[in-house]
Amino acid sequence: MKRFYKNVTIEKSDDGYAILLDSKPVKTPMRRALSLPNAQMADAVKYEWDAQGEEIDAASMVVTGFANAAIDRVADERDVFIGNIAAYAENDLFCYRADGPDPLVQRQMNEWQPWLDWAKQYYDAPLICVAGIMHKDQPEQSLINLRQVVTKMDNFELTAMAKMTHISGSLIASLAIFEGQANVDIIWDALCLDELWQEEQWGSDSFAEKHRNDRRTDFEAAVNFLKLV
């Protein structure tokens, strides 16, 4: 689509912050008002629209895309998104450990267990670890407590968390970032521990590296959107 506007401005109202293109408000793909919750996010969306050249590249407008999803999808299906996000606690990556070799087992213990210990203390939500991939039911009260945390999130926070948990496979890792207890560099290395271990043993693979880097880019985009909320 060719760029059809010259000026991008922000208008504050009781409903939030709107983005105006030549004084006309931007709509979401579902033709709803693109109402943003704060000035910081509005500035980020304005920057994306300002930065477009002669052709509009929707893929380059990451913050706008997340905001559209929050308004068009999450707002209509809050319970579904809450359930999907909270469900990662039932099979959290950090709970499923290798049964060998010992150096890998120890590394998982060193890098994953502190986050489970944090969740136990912070949310009163202890989770059980197992060796192997066989499912293990988690304590019901822990799942309830973690779901309550997710339920309290607003639609914009849920949008970011949905992407983060999907990519990471870990509600605990995503909550650590949500609560400001971890940054991307620390948590991403923990999330990719098994992949990195395999590369150390057998060498790197360019396809696997690209796939991991692409996932990290998407993960960071969700984290950055969460910070705007």
Image (cartoon, helix red, strand yellow):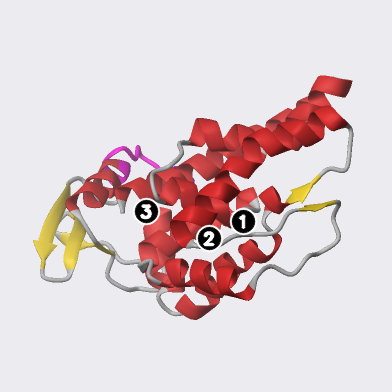
Q: Are marks 3 and 1 in contact (CB under 8 Å)?
A: no
* Neighbour tally class for label 1: few under 14, some 14-19, many 20 plus, Cα within 10 Å: some
Which segment is the magenta one? 48-60
Q: Which of 23 and 207 lies nearest the eye of the viewer? A: 207
* Neighbour tally class for label 3: few under 14, some 14-19, many 20 plus, Cα within 10 Å: many
Q: Is 107 in the magenta?
A: no
Residue at (31, 66) in percent of width and height: 27
Where is residue 197? Give x, y as percent.
78, 28
Q: Which of 10 and 4 lies nearest the eye of the viewer? A: 10
Q: Quadrant of residue 113?
A: top right
* Residue 82 visible to an observer of this rendering: yes
Residue at (72, 29) in percent of width and height: 209
In the image, taking residue 219 as reference, residue 224 lies left or right, namely left
- Spatial CA distance of label 3 from label 1 is 20 Å
Residue under pointer 3: 64
- The amino acid at mark 2 is Ala
Mark identifier at residue 166: 1
* Residue 77 visible to an observer of this rendering: no
Name the mark nearer the viewer: 3 or 2.
2
Residue at (56, 53) in percent of width and height: 172
Mark identifier at residue 162: 2
- The amino acid at mark 3 is Thr
- The amino acid at mark 1 is His
Q: Are marks 2 and 1 in contact (CB under 8 Å)?
A: yes
Residue at (67, 66) in percent of width and height: 90
